[in-house]
Amino acid sequence: MPSTMTAGSKTPLPRLATFEDALAKLPDGYVDGYFGGRPWGVTAKRSEDGKRIWLYGEELGGKDIVSFNLYRLAEPGSILKPCEMSSDKVIEFVIGFEPSTGKLRLENSGRK
């Protein structure tokens, strides 16, 4: 059930639908995975009424983060509120993030 983003979004509607589809596939809670060939840890939380989704992700062994809130509106549409980053960065991350099916391999991080 993809919907359109509001607030003057310049992202094409098919891209937003792909974003919402990818977001819907992420489980609630914590999941490890990869984005851009690098390991990430991601936590997603959904409100009980389904009107708000919060996501925080950080590159494991790195410095990059992704964080946003997505609010579902009563009328068709949603409002994406990235936390101190661009909407494009958030959309690219959610579409490109691949949850891991096994143990992550952390290179150059001192972790195993």
Image (cartoon, rainbow, N blue to C red):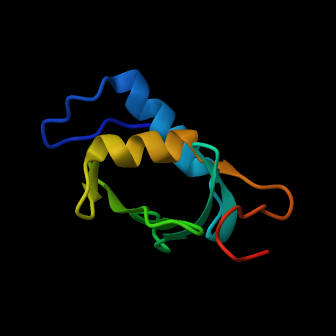
Q: Residue at x 56, y 40 (%)?
A: 96
Q: Position of residue 69 (x, y in %)?
A: 34, 63
70 horizontally vs 86: left or right: right
Q: Is residue 77 above or below residue 27?
A: above
Q: Position of residue 19 (x, y in %)?
A: 47, 39
Q: Residue at x 76, y 55 (%)?
A: 100
Q: Residue at x 69, y 76 (%)?
A: 110
- The quarter of the picture where the C terminus appears is bottom right
Q: Is residue 86 above or below residue 41?
A: above
Q: Residue furthest left?
A: 8
Q: Could one spot residue 77 in this view of the protein?
A: no
96 horizontally vs 82: left or right: right
Compare residues 54 and 1 and report the one nearer the observer.
Answer: 54
15 horizontally vs 94: left or right: left
Compare residues 3 and 102 and report the one nearer the observer.
Answer: 102
Number of marks in the rendered image: 0
Q: Could one spot residue 69 in this view of the protein?
A: yes
Q: Position of residue 67 (x, y in %)?
A: 38, 64
Compare residues 56 and 79 and report the one nearer the observer.
Answer: 56
